[in-house]
Amino acid sequence: MARFNTPIDDIKYLNCEFLDRSLLKNSPLLSELNDDTTQAIFDEASKVAENVLFPLNRSGDEQGCSYNKGQVQTPDGFKQAYQQLTAAGWGNLSCKTEYGGQGLPHYLANAVDEMLIAGNMSFTIYLGLTIGAYHAIEQFASEQIKEQYLPAMVSGKWSGTMCLTEPHCGTDLGLIRSNAIADGAGAYKITGSKIFISAGEHDLSENIIHLVLARTPSAPAGIKGISLFLVPKFLLDKKSQLSQNNNVSCSGLEHKMGIKASATCAMQFDGATGYLIGDLHKGMQAMFVMMNSARIHVGIQGLALAHAAYSGALDYAKNRLQSRSISGSKYPELAADPLIVHPDIRRMLMTMKAYTEGARAFSSWLSFQLDVSQYCDDLIQRQQAHELVSLLTPVFKVFLTDMGELVSSLGIQIYGGHGYIRENGMEQYLRDARICQLYEGSNGIQALDLIGRKLPAHMGRYCRHFFHPLSAFIEDHKDNERLAAYIRPLAKSFTRLQNASLYIAQQGLTNPEQAASVASDYLKLFGLVVVAYMWAQMAQKIDTRQGDMAAEFYDAKLVTGLFYMQHLLPQTTALSASIMLGGDSVMALKESQF
Ligand SMILES: Cc1cc2nc3c(=O)[nH]c(=O)nc-3n(C[C@H](O)[C@H](O)[C@H](O)COP(=O)(O)OP(=O)(O)OC[C@H]3O[C@@H](n4cnc5c(N)ncnc54)[C@H](O)[C@@H]3O)c2cc1C
């Protein structure tokens, strides 16, 4: 079985040394949070991931969820783990204290999330969906609904779902057929079929709070006619206690490639009572809040699985003996040298490490921007951070989930044939990682969101929130010879990104199909530059001051960053060429020629 350790040192370094938290220094959010407390939280989370969740990962995958007459049973051990984690508050770190949450910053909660997901992705889906639903309710529901539902959701006693997808409608939510008819008493009767609903039914919580997209009879056609409803599995009585069943049923479980311990359900709503969340016909607005939080969460899933695969592969590369080093035996006392001496194994390990650590820095930094967008006392900074997060959310989701697939596949490669064998656990990471590229808006759709909505927003203003600080950073450090190996490649790839952005913006106005044809290439180019910016900042900070980590840690960071600049960032050259040539050949064939 592949070994698993959390990236605890890297997480401590990023949160306590890399992040510049000065923008929130006056915020009550950080007033009781010193580095000792932060590190103690990380140490505990790491133990939970390694000792509680990881031991259930393989068995959960083997056993999966089971379905019997509308009831869904999660794998052995999940219920106890759920009780243990929710009692300790691991599911509600960033929820507001007034509802029983811990009121901690997103950057801290997301770092904890990475460790828990890496330990057992399927398990954490039950917690993650509840938090997504919490955010939409907290922002859009009436005070009465918040009081009735949020405390029990925050405590984990009740869980949440997100019910969008229907058999004929996935990406194009304008096609939704589920309907909502006013019952004359302030609520609605919801009828329709939803598929692929994560955590739609299970045995972990006492009630399940579904957030359902549906259409009222008078609603305009398409996406503008959709409303959002809160539909509990069990209705509440006047004292907010569970009363009768609410005509919501699970008609079956999907059989999937991965995340087998996460219940993916077909759900039936037969005149179930639902309560409007937000304004009528403005359901997508509320749902976007949930989806944006969920997209960042899914990006973190990609990162977490990449780390889990790296953790397993690294251990194997150090222990599996095969062949002698090309430069002469390194361990003559052994029958052969360990895999880690071989350059091609090193290439794969460095690729895994450079992507994963760079992406983790991106995750910390973006999560901090999310905190600034909500808690900074300077309203201009707050707005800028909000727009920056909007711009980078699709980049984050796609770059980290594509990386999750690539890195978990490399993990199998390092294991050789043993990686393909189930009992070693490496193939599970790849199967689990694959869904991240599909749900919460498939990766192709995220690329369209980037070029179609985010790039042109306010005449490029969102983009300038990223481009201007990056430009200033390059300008500030371009003459520092010690940093030249980081700053020069960053500057070159940034120029490619700027040119590509201009091209995409122009094409978007005159020939949107051209722009859409190269949108995924453009997003990848963007992601590579963001992560290069993270590596360059890490190098610059380490060059200026080294903190509490061992000297070897900083040394490894600098070398790994160099590897990123020399061997991964050059992909921007090819991507830029592909983008600038446009999409003619992409669209040239007639359908009959395929
Ligand atoms: C395990 C699992 C869990 C899920 N959990 C949930 C959940 O909790 N709640 C929920 O509501 N849904 C859930 N989903 C559904 C998921 O979000 C959808 O599968 C996803 O949105 C894509 O929809 P689709 O599968 O219908 O694909 P389609 O929309 O049919 O798309 C098929 C392909 O075409 C591409 N495509 C579609 N339109 C365009 C376009 N305009 N331009 C370019 N490309 C396009 C897509 O990118 C995709 O590659 C889950 C799915 C799975 C498999």
Image: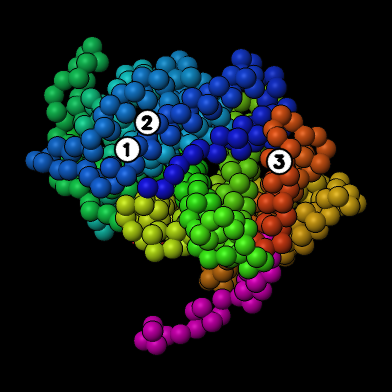
Image-quadrant location for residue 136? top left
For marks 2 and 3 on the same chain, the one whose residue lies earlier in the sequence: 2
- Where does residue 82 sit, x and y in percent of width and height? 31, 28
- Where does residue 301 sit, x and y in percent of width and height? 45, 45
- Residue highlighted by disc 1: 56
Magenta stretch containing residue 245, yes or no? no
Q: Give the side of residue 566 with respect to residue 43, left or right.
A: right
For marks 1 and 3 on the same chain, the one whose residue lies earlier in the sequence: 1
Q: Give the side of residue 109 with respect to residue 505, left or right.
A: left
- The residue shown at (65%, 51%) is 531
Do the residues under discs 1 and 3 have CB atoms within 8 angstroms? no
* Circle 1 or circle 3, nearest the eye: 3
Identity of the residue furthest to the left in this view:
69
Instruction: Name the element at disc 3.
Output: helix
Decide: is 557 above or below 343: above
The magenta segment: 569-594
| Closest to the observer, 9 or 253 | 9
Look at label 1 and name its amino acid.
Answer: Leu
Q: Tag on residue 552?
A: 3
